[in-house]
Image (spheres, rainbow, N blue to C red):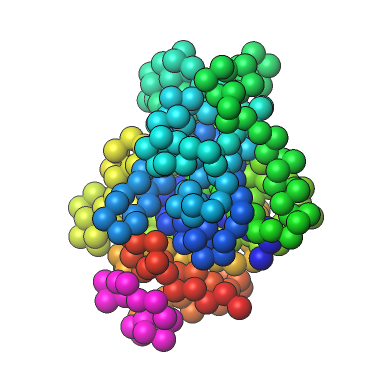
Amino acid sequence: MPSTVIIGGFFGDEGKGKIISYLALHDKPTIVVRGGAGPNAGHTIKDDDKTYKVRMLPSGFLNKEAKVMIGPGVVVNPEVLLKEISDFGVEGRAFLDNNCGIIEQSHREKDSQGRLKEKIGSTGSGTGPANAERAMRTLKMAKEIDILKSYIIDVPLEINSALDRKENVLIEGTQGTHLSLWHGTYPFVTSKDVTASGICADVGIGPKRIDDVIVVFKSYLTRVGTGPMPGELSAEETSQKGWEEFGTVTGRLRRAAEFDFDLARRAIMLSSANQISITKLDVRFPKCAGVKSIDDLEDDAKSFIKNIEEKLGVPVTLIGTGPHIDDVIDIRA
Ligand code: IMP
Ligand code: MG
């Protein structure tokens, strides 16, 4: 499909990065563009023996033919961005918008102590304080930063022109629906709206130009940081189930719970999702590891997927069955 937006349906860390990198390689978008808050998001991508931890660039960078862009709604840490451009070898095809906000040392300091750190459990990346300053109209913009000059482009114009030429554009969300500043479990949320509409506004594409909205749910629920979490398991129960995970950005142990249909239903409603992606099916059902066809899933896993489709009324089109990019069952029409 020409334009696809991918968002998280729970509290972030649903495994979007893996699904996005699969789509970037498989659907051959000419542009992969990132919306969302900032470097508070971490995506982990495994390609053969390499593991990439991405905080600023879009996760679709493994497609070497694609341009990767960061939309104006995102706040950027220039050091993290430049390091990723160099480490991941994307020099020459990585861009950010004139109006991306800039995170400075003072924002990171404010984010690593006091109420934000202790009550909200923020990632300490400076994202929230930078967005607060943006609302005050005092934040620096990317166009004011010399070392970023050669990477600056008009992102909304680029993606809308690509769509005019009937090219594919992949729009990448970060965090998860229930961390949205508007729709999440306030005040235990991030500093932006991260539903599909918010992500589209971040990159500068209007609601009528979106063809597909894919919401990503993990096979179980995790949450890093504070805030309510229905049916939260103890650390011991989490480990017994094999659902133990550690944060990409902060290294913190993620809290875990059973798949939550109420949260999922609301995420679908808020973003008008027309497709569901389920990740980490192999963590729930180890026999599914590496399976590429729906027919080869064991019966329990098949019923788990069928139950999700029936209860939520939206088709499951992409299923993650392992950490590698091609560990995906792709059942899109
Ligand atoms: P902040 O976005 O760093 O201000 O953190 C606010 C809350 O959102 C904290 O509970 C964080 O752990 C959580 N959070 C922010 N970004 C992500 C993410 O990408 N994945 C998971 N949790 C996140
Ligand atoms: Mg993450």
Find residue 321 and report its image quarter: bottom left
- Residue at image position (31%, 49%) is 51
For the image shown, how many numbered marks are present on the structure? 0
Image quarter (top left, top right, bottom left or bottom right) of the C terminus: bottom right
Please, is residue 128 above or below residue 236 in the view? above
Where residue 85 appears, x then y in whole percent? 45, 36
Where residue 187 appears, x then y in whole percent? 53, 33
Find residue 95 and report its image quarter: top right
Would you say residue 296 sits in the magenta stretch? yes
Q: Is residue 307 left or right of residue 195?
A: left
**Camera-side residue of 38 and 233:** 38
- Residue at image position (57%, 17%) is 145
Residue 253 appears in view:
yes
Where residue 159 appears, x then y in whole percent? 70, 47
**Camera-side residue of 70 and 7:** 70
- Residue at image position (61%, 50%) is 31
Please, is residue 19 above or below residue 125 in the view? below
Residue 261 appears in view:
no
Find residue 253 and report its image quarter: top left
Q: Is residue 290 left or right of residue 193?
A: left
Please, is residue 244 above or below residue 182 in the view? below
Where residue 157 appears, x then y in whole percent? 74, 41
Region of the chain picked out in magenta, as a range: 285-299
Furthest residue to the front? 92
Would you say residue 319 sits in the magenta stretch? no
Image quarter (top left, top right, bottom left or bottom right) of the N terminus: bottom right
**Camera-side residue of 132 and 318:** 318
- Residue at image position (26%, 55%) is 49
